Amino acid sequence: MTDTVAPPSGLGGCREVGPGETAAVSRALGADRLVAAPASEKLLQSGVGGGADGRFFTRGGPDRSLVFVGNSVLPIRGERDDLEMLGAAVAGAGFGPMSVHGRRDLVNGVWPALERRWGPARERRCGQFLMVLDRPVDRSAVLDGVRPASLQEFDMVLAAAASMYAEELHADPFAVGAGVPFRRRVARSVARGRTFVAREDDAVFFKADVAAITHEIAQIQGIWVRPDLRGTGLGAGGTAAVCAVLQDRGLTPSLVVNGSNTPARAAYRRVGLVDAVDYATILM
């Protein structure tokens, strides 16, 4: 087999993307650069081949349909029947259960087949929005003291991350594998300079993570303010500080927010972020 020959198809005509389809995958991801940021980072780092950082699945080729499976399922494109078959193929390949997220209509297309195999969702967040900062951040809004966390601050960062996880996802981050996978994710983010914090004495009071970075986009997640300090502007100021760093690197900041989280949406709007994509997340 040469690198221009697509791998054989499996269930319903679905298959993993082949090495000769890099250009097609790149086109698909580039056509939806905000949503596709996690998949685009995988492509930049290790190409289209499947590995520990994720796999691409298609039915009929990446120009027609594409789903990325990393730590979660991210549908990129496809008609309803393509997404239905790709969902069945992903579940049938032994992945999951795992969260599903992306454009609301694409999530709704891929989820039914996954649900039949994985069972009901723990929570469906179908009223989310992906927001983007497409103009320079107001530097006067930046909170002083926000910076990348150091590994020496791991314990206090872990405490903040665990508080955010439990509150946002309604689950114990230490319940799986005695907390080892969660600790590793937090440590990896800190080691890569992707966790930003502001602290006072021995406690973090603001935290945000940069989950994905491409040549153009940076996707922020895990924004957290210590509960007793909420409503004081720290969320907006901290987010503005992270956005300023990312813009200085030539990146466009983006993030996903629940439509029902009125205070957070208002804070992000004060920073200058605007709704760009109707989004959804299904938690397992």
Image: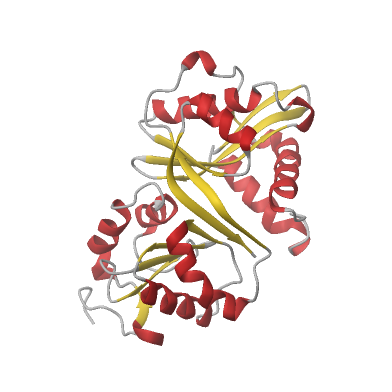
The answer to whether residue 273 is above or below residue 76 is above
Q: Give the residue drawn at x 74%, y 46%.
A: 167
The quadrant of the picture occupied by the C terminus is bottom right
> Based on the displayed image, in which of its 4 quarters is residue 125 positioned?
bottom right
The answer to whether residue 110 is above or below residue 152 is below
Residue 7 seen in the current view: yes
Task: Please state the horizontal and vertical placement of residue 129, each as a whole percent of the image.
Answer: 50, 45
**Tally of numbered discs:** 0
Q: Nearer the viewer, residue 270 or 238?
A: 270
The answer to whether residue 18 is above or below residue 234 is below
Q: Residue furthest top?
A: 140
Q: Give the residue drawn at x 22%, y 78%.
A: 5
Judge from the rendering whether residue 267 lies leftward or rightward of residue 155; answer left or right: left
Judge from the rendering whether residue 186 lies leftward or rightward of residue 89; answer left or right: right
Q: Give the residue drawn at x 51%, y 29%.
A: 269
The quadrant of the picture occupied by the N terminus is bottom left
Task: Please state the horizontal and vertical placement of residue 73, each as a whole percent of the image.
Answer: 50, 64
> Based on the displayed image, in which of its 4 quarters is residue 68 positioned?
bottom left
Residue 10 seen in the current view: no
Task: Please state the horizontal and vertical placement of residue 260, each as a whole percent of the image.
Answer: 62, 44
The answer to whether residue 62 is above or below residue 135 is below
Q: Give the residue drawn at x 59%, y 47%.
A: 188
Q: How is the image coloured?
A: secondary structure
Task: Please state the horizontal and vertical placement of residue 259, each as a whole percent of the image.
Answer: 57, 44
